[in-house]
Image (tube, rainbow, N blue to C red):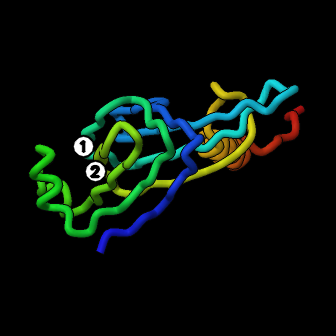
């Protein structure tokens, strides 16, 4: 049986925000301006380990429903997607007013936050903080011990 993972309201419009081929990542974003500020209520849908996409459009209007298709081989073949990808990945259907698009990916995450529409995702900021901390920790480990001046 198919599993609805997320159903967003009809007034939400999502669009392809970026696709990173090297990391197999696809980000869809919806933003609503918060009156009187420079910020937006942002909803990010992040697909990881993307193996294939069949997108009818780069915009998803009239709400968005994301469903994981469990009996996916037939749907994948019908869409022209190699069913061998489904050995290690999942088939996700993205239903919107434009019709049904498909994404073959390892997983999907959804996050909601407030920030500039064109700002980085909360995942990018968290990863950057972890990376900075790892560099700091590594630098502290490699500091030379202080030595007294020889006289």
The residue at the point 46 percent across, 63 percent down is: 5
Report how many numbered discs are placed on residues in the image.
2
- Can residue 114 be seen in the rendering of this structure? yes
- Give how far across and how far down residue 77 sits, in percent: 10, 52
Q: Which mark is residue 104?
A: 2
Q: Is residue 35 above or below residue 45?
A: above
Residue toward you, 149 or 105 = 105
Q: Nearer the viewer, residue 113 or 133?
A: 113
Residue 135 horizontal side relative to residue 64, left or right:
right
Q: Earlier in the sequence, mark 1 or mark 2?
A: 1
Can you say which quadrant of the picture contains the N terminus? bottom left
| For the residues bearing labels 1 and 2, Cβ distance under 8 angstroms | yes
Q: Relative to residue 77, is residue 53 depicted above or below?
A: above
Q: Does 149 appear above or below 92?
A: above
- The local crowd at label 2, few if under 14, some if 14 to 19, many if 20 or more residues have their Cα within 10 Å, is many
Residue wearing tag 1: 52
Q: Nearer the viewer, residue 24 or 7?
A: 7
Identify the residue shown where x is 16% and y is 56%. 75
Residue 54 rendering spot, x and y as whole percentages: 25, 39
Q: Residue at x 11, y 60 (%)?
A: 74
Q: Is residue 112 above or below residue 59?
A: below
Work out which quarter of the rendered image holds the C terminus and state it: top right
Residue 139, visible in the rendered structure: no
Secondary structure of residue under mark 1: strand
Q: In this image, 39 relative to 119: left or right?
A: right
Position in image of residue 20 (x %, y %): 39, 32
């Amino acid at each position: 049986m198919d599993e609805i993972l997320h159903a967003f309201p009809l007034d939400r419009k999502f669009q392809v925000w970026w696709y990173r081929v090297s990391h197999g990542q696809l980000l869809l974003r919806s933003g609503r301006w918060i009156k009187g500020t420079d910020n937006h209520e942002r909803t990010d849908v992040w697909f990881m380990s993307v193996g294939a996409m069949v997108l009818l459009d780069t915009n998803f209007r009239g709400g968005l429903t994301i469903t994981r298709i469990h009996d996916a081989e037939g749907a994948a073949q019908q869409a022209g997607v190699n069913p061998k990808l489904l050995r290690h990945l999942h088939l996700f259907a993205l239903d919107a007013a434009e019709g049904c698009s498909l994404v073959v990916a390892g997983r999907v995450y959804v996050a909601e936050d407030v920030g500039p529409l064109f700002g980085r995702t909360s995942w990018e900021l968290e990863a950057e903080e972890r990376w900075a901390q790892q560099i700091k920790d590594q630098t502290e480990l490699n500091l030379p011990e202080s030595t007294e001046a020889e006289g």
